[in-house]
Amino acid sequence: AILKVHAKDKSLSPSVDLTAVARQTPGMSGADLANLLNEGAIVAARQNKTEIDQDDIANALERIVIGLEKKNALMSEKKRKLVAYHEAGHAILGALMNDFDVVAKISIVPRGPTGGVTIFMPSEDRLSSGLYSKEFLQNRICVALGGRLAEEIINGKDNVTTGTSNDFQQC
């Protein structure tokens, strides 16, 4: 409902699903949501679009939550593979868990302090209740450590990187 208020003066593509946007923005205030749509408009304008589409809003959300895309960041093939395996580790463990959110996006594009990101979409029930089961919280710890586990499997336990430090903080 709040998103609709902030979207009324924006030129949104008919394909924009505000319900999906709301699911991706739990805990955001009205001002945060207004900022998100304004950022989406900026993303669209930079591409000379006349309407804001779902991708523009998704890019704006990533920019706000994770940080600016590092367009000039050069990643070696070795680092790109490492980040890809790391993010895949999160996604695979998330998919294997009975009580966990679904993967919405995986990216190995560096943003802010991250080399990559795996974004999960909360279920309707979890969003509406705001309650988390013990199983879900345990699964969250497992998924957060999935990147480290993937690095260990691919590179050996003595070659795990400091990229996993943020994952430990999430736990």
Image (tube, grey):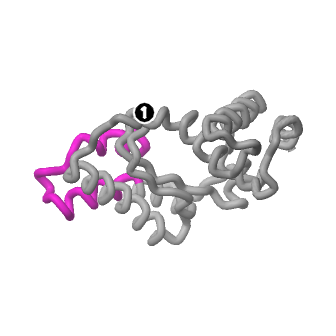
- Residue at horizontal 52%, vertical 62%? 135
User: Relative to 100, is 10 on the left or the right?
Assistant: right
Residue 50 versus residue 154 in the image, above or below: above
Q: Which of these two is toward me, 108 or 144?
A: 108
Count of residue discs? 1
Q: Amino acid at mark 1?
A: Gly
Whether 9 is among the magenta residues is no
Residue 38 rendering spot, x and y as whole percentages: 72, 32
Residue 84 versus residue 60 in the image, above or below: below
Whether 152 is among the magenta residues is yes
Furthest residue in direction front, as rendered:
48
- The residue at which mark 1 appears reads as 112
Residue 27 rendering spot, x and y as whole percentages: 68, 39
Q: Main secondary structure of the magenta part?
A: helix
Residue 168 rendering spot, x and y as whole percentages: 35, 43
- Residue at horizontal 37%, vertical 61%? 88
The magenta stretch spans which residues?
144-171
Q: Quadrant of the C terminus?
A: top left
Q: Quadrant of residue 8?
A: top right
Q: Is residue 28 visible?
A: no
- Residue at horizontal 46%, vertical 64%? 94
Residue 74 versus residue 151 in the image, above or below: above
Helix, strand or loop at label 1? It is: loop
Residue 117 rendering spot, x and y as whole percentages: 43, 49
Q: Which of these two is toward me, 132 or 65?
A: 65
